[in-house]
Amino acid sequence: MRARPSDHFDGRRFVNPTGIAGQPFSAVPRMLMEPRAKWPAWIDDPPRRPAPLDGAAAVVTPVGHATFLIQTAAGNILTDPMYSTRAGPFNLAGPRRVRPPAVGFDDLPPIAVVLLSHNHYDHCDRATLARLAKRFDPIVVTPIGNGPLARSCGLRRVEELDWWQAAAAPPLSVTLTPAYHFSARTPFDRNRALWGGFVIGAGGRTIYFAGDTAYGPFFADVRRRSPPIDLALLPIGAYEPRWFMHVVHMNPAEAVQAHRDLEAQLSVAMHYGTFQLTPEGIDEPVRALEEACRTQQVPLSRFRALPFGESLRVG
């Protein structure tokens, strides 16, 4: 699929409507010099088996980072699948995961649909995609420009979307929504592929997966253009230092504001506690989330950091 010039595509590269799509590479060395909290080398959490659907509209299980298993009667979904040890080129470089996937790959039920929000290594892992292609041959729904990468992993059924487009191929409703982020696999392909989130309809319920994003006014647009959101999956981690990350990732306070903008019945946190991408401590995002909920008068029961591997019934 070819993109047409728009408020997020200038004819050559994708942009955010704010005009900012990530920080320049020249800022990266300064960011890497920031003091970093020490994370544990490994957390030996035993994997769990996902709960059965048992008549629910959906059962949602956090696998780790931005990977969720979403079971529905129409088919099972996996978001931003990442089962490798490192988030980097050839799985040899980049941050190392500190806890195993909370649902073992061999314990996954049949996967009908993969939602791939963008091409960063911690969200788009070639080794995991190749395993999924070989075992399940799923449909992949992804923003414009990510199709060639997905197909190179052996995935045959790939549908590329622009923001606000609905997918035709999956057995359930999927619409691509905006995000404020950027894309790159190398220094030479920056913002050649689009990024986004997804609104999913399942059994009369609506689930929103934000992907990877900074805070922006589009959350209110998602609410206006979607059915009432029963569950929002929102990133809360990898937000420091703010001078660098504010155009890339939300911090927990902004995630709570996004929850309010979406008017979500319930939000579940993601994008924390698995890979140390930025300086904050491993437990800091959850502590900051709880404080932001108190400050913004959102009940802690309405925005949860669900234990990895714990299944949540929707409907």
Image: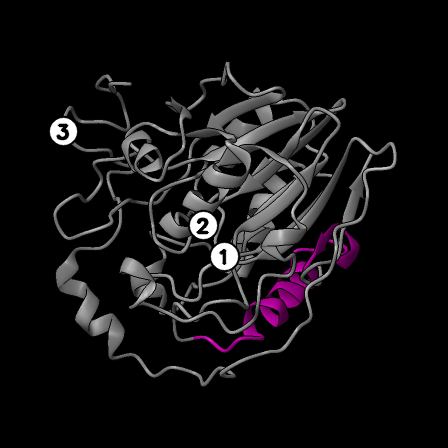
The answer to whether residue 215 is visible is: no
Give SS at disc 3.
Answer: loop
Q: Is residue 295 magenta?
A: yes
In 3D space, how far apart are the residues under numbered discs 1 and 2 (Cα atoms)?
Answer: 6 Å
Q: Position of residue 81 (x, y in %)?
A: 49, 48
* Mark 1 Cα-neighbour bin, 10 Å: few <14, some 14–19, many ≥20: many
Residue 191, picture quadrant: top left
Q: Which part of the image, by quadrant, shows the C terminus?
A: top right
Residues shaded magenta:
280-305
Circles 1, 2 touching at the beta carbon (< 8 Å): yes
Question: Visible in this render: residue 248?
Answer: yes
- How far apart are the alpha carbons under marks 3 and 2? 29 Å
Instruction: Say which amino acid is labelled 1.
Output: Tyr
Q: Is residue 236 left or right of residue 130?
A: right
Residue visible at 23% across and 16% down in the picture: 4
Residue at the disc numbered 2: 128
- Identity of the residue furthest to the right in this view: 54
Q: Residue furthest top?
A: 168
Q: Distance of mark 3 from mark 1, alpha carbons?
A: 32 Å
State the scheme by which the image is colored.
Answer: one colour
Mark in front: 3 vs 1 = 1
Q: Which residue: 36% across, 65% down?
A: 242
Image position of 209 with respect to 23: above or below:
above
The residue closer to the viewer here, 223 or 179, is: 179
To which residue does mark 3 refer? 12
**Helix, strand or loop at disc 2?**
helix
Q: Is residue 51 left or right of residue 158?
A: right
Query: What amino acid is labelled 3 in the image?
Result: Arg
Which is nearer the eye, 223 or 13? 13
Q: Which mark is residue 83?
A: 1
